[in-house]
Image (cartoon, rainbow, N blue to C red):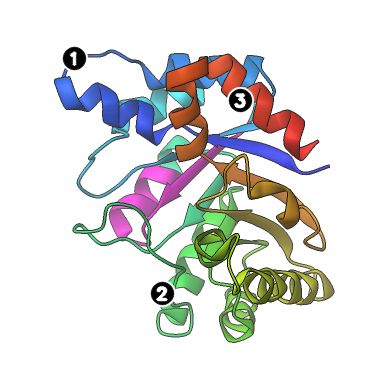
Amino acid sequence: MALLGVNIDHVATLRNARGGSYPDPLAAALIAEANGADGITAHLREDRRHIRDEDIQALKAQIKTRLNLEMANTPEMVEIALNAKPYMVTLVPERRQELTTEGGLDVIRYLDSLKESTTTLQTAGIKVSLFIDPDLRQLEASRQTGAAIVEFHTGTYCEAFGGPEQAKALAALMKAAEQAVAWGIEVNAGHGLNYDNVQPVLAMPGLVELNIGHSIIGESVFTGLASAVSRMKALIS
């Protein structure tokens, strides 16, 4: 059974829209945990557009499950991770002008830097996951970094869901996951997954965890966060 990591970034986005402290991402994380979340994911962006440094500190101190810190591969973020000591760091590409993460890391291009950061973080006892497209060339480069985990970007599959390209996009995820397992790399997946499209990806070989945020927080507007998390947990269980 795949684990469910709940991304709480959009709770912080809502808070920041008005300033102040409400709604509190930590409170959301605790509700998610109480209703089936196996971990909490938070993306600390360079511009702090949603999650802030103090959110990471509060989450690390108070959640009972696992904190997955999404971050860019920069010296600043590596230093923050070394101080915060989350359970896991997921290295993601980041551009200021994007609304959300638009694709996987170009591990081939930034291999040396990613290898250095991965070694530093894993030596400190922090698991490292690389967020990549289901591309065997990027997977091979990821293996060269020494990262124990990859998170496959499911955005292409989600955009194709219900259309003629769905099967092709899903097959790419399956093939990449199968190769990762053969190389002893742990498999996670996420981006764009929702209540309609999530179940087919559960067939990915070796799948350990799904990280889902936008659809859960969006559903919570209508049904409440507890219900939204428990419904997703039931679907992937």
Whole-percent x, y for residue 101 in the image:
38, 57
- Residue most toward the front? 163
**Between marks 1 and 3 in the image, the one whose residue lies nearer the viewer:** 3
Quarter of the figure that contains the N terminus = top right
* Of labels 2 and 1, the one closer to you: 1
Give the CA separation, mark 1 to mark 3: 25 Å
Q: Quadrant of residue 32?
A: top right
Decide which of 226, 184 is in the foreground and name it: 226
How crowded pointer 1 is (Cα within 10 Å; few <14, some 14-19, many 20+) is rated as few
Residue at 18% across, 26% down? 17
| Amino acid residing under circle 1 | Gly
Tell me the number on the disc at residue 113: 2
At numbered mark 1, what does the secondary structure look like: helix, strand or loop?
loop
Q: Which residue does the image show at 58% across and 23% down from the upper left? A: 228
Crowding at dot 2, Cα within 10 Å, few <14 / some 14-19 / many 20+, comes out as: some
Which region of the structure is painted magenta? 66-81
Amino acid residing under circle 2: Ser
Give 109 or 145, whichever is nearer the viewer.
109
Under circle 2, the secondary element is helix
Q: Which residue is mark 1?
A: 20
Residue 229 bears which disc, if any? 3
Between the C-alphas of marks 2 and 3, the distance is: 36 Å
Q: Quadrant of the C terminus?
A: top right
Could you tell which of marks 2 and 1 lies nearer the N-terminus?
1
Q: Is 115 placed above or below 84 here?
A: below
Q: Is residue 77 left or right of residue 146?
A: left
